[in-house]
Image (cartoon, helix red, strand yellow):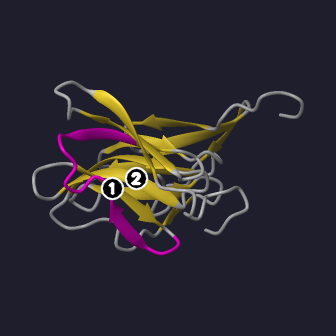
Amino acid sequence: MAGGSRLSQVILLSMGVWAVLLGGCNPVEVPLGPQAINSRYREEQPAVSGSGQYVAFVSNRDRRQQIYLYHLSQRQFIQLPRLNQPNAIIESPSISYNARYIVYLSSIRGKPEIILYDRVTKRQEALTLAYPGWVRNPSISPDGRYVVFETDRRGQWDIEVIDRGPNIELDIPDGPV
């Protein structure tokens, strides 16, 4: 909307069978089938990118818990090579401005770790490997430099921030992806 604040697009879910995408007051049906965001399986823990173009979420549609990335305006899924690992419990995705970076919790050895995935390099990095205490609820800044999360290393849940440093490639509005 020109001259005012623009409301984010809203996705209404109804029993995992159909969805309506609202832009203002004009409903537009999201196509069913392989490109529909919803399936007959559980979709949960959605996160929207700062650009409003991407939604990341957790689903068990392939009989295991995985993170999916969906491009809203193109109405298609984005491939995430090497992100979803077999035998891992994956949850709590958060995405940067253009969804270049995805942070999430992964539990392979019983203790959750915060993992950062870079869609450009297709690499993962464990941010809290050997971190004292438990971690949960990671969130990444729009530019991808900062990751905030909860930790219990002092015996109570506190907030901590990881600064990935000034030399990382930032996820900026006109950046690669």
Reading the chain from its start, which is encountered first: label 1 or label 2? 2
Number of numbered labels in the structure image: 2
From the viewer's perspective, is 8 left or right of 127? Answer: right
* Residue lying at 46% horizontally and 60% vertically, measured from the top left: 33
Residue assigned mark 2:
103
The image quadrant that residue 50 belongs to is top right
Q: Nearer the viewer, residue 133 or 29?
A: 133
From the viewer's perspective, is 25 left or right of 56? Answer: right
Density class for disc 2 (Cα within 10 Å; few <14, some 14-19, many ≥20) is many
In the rendered image of this protein, does residue 147 appear above or below residue 130? Answer: above
Q: Distance from label 1 to label 2 (Cα)?
A: 9 Å
Residue assigned mark 1:
127
* Residue lying at 15% horizontally and 63% vertically, measured from the top left: 87
Quadrant in which the C terminus is drawn = bottom right
Coordinates of residue 140 in the picture (x, y in percent) = 48, 46
Q: The residue tagged with tag 2: helix, strand or loop?
A: strand
Magenta part of the protein: which range? Answer: 120-138
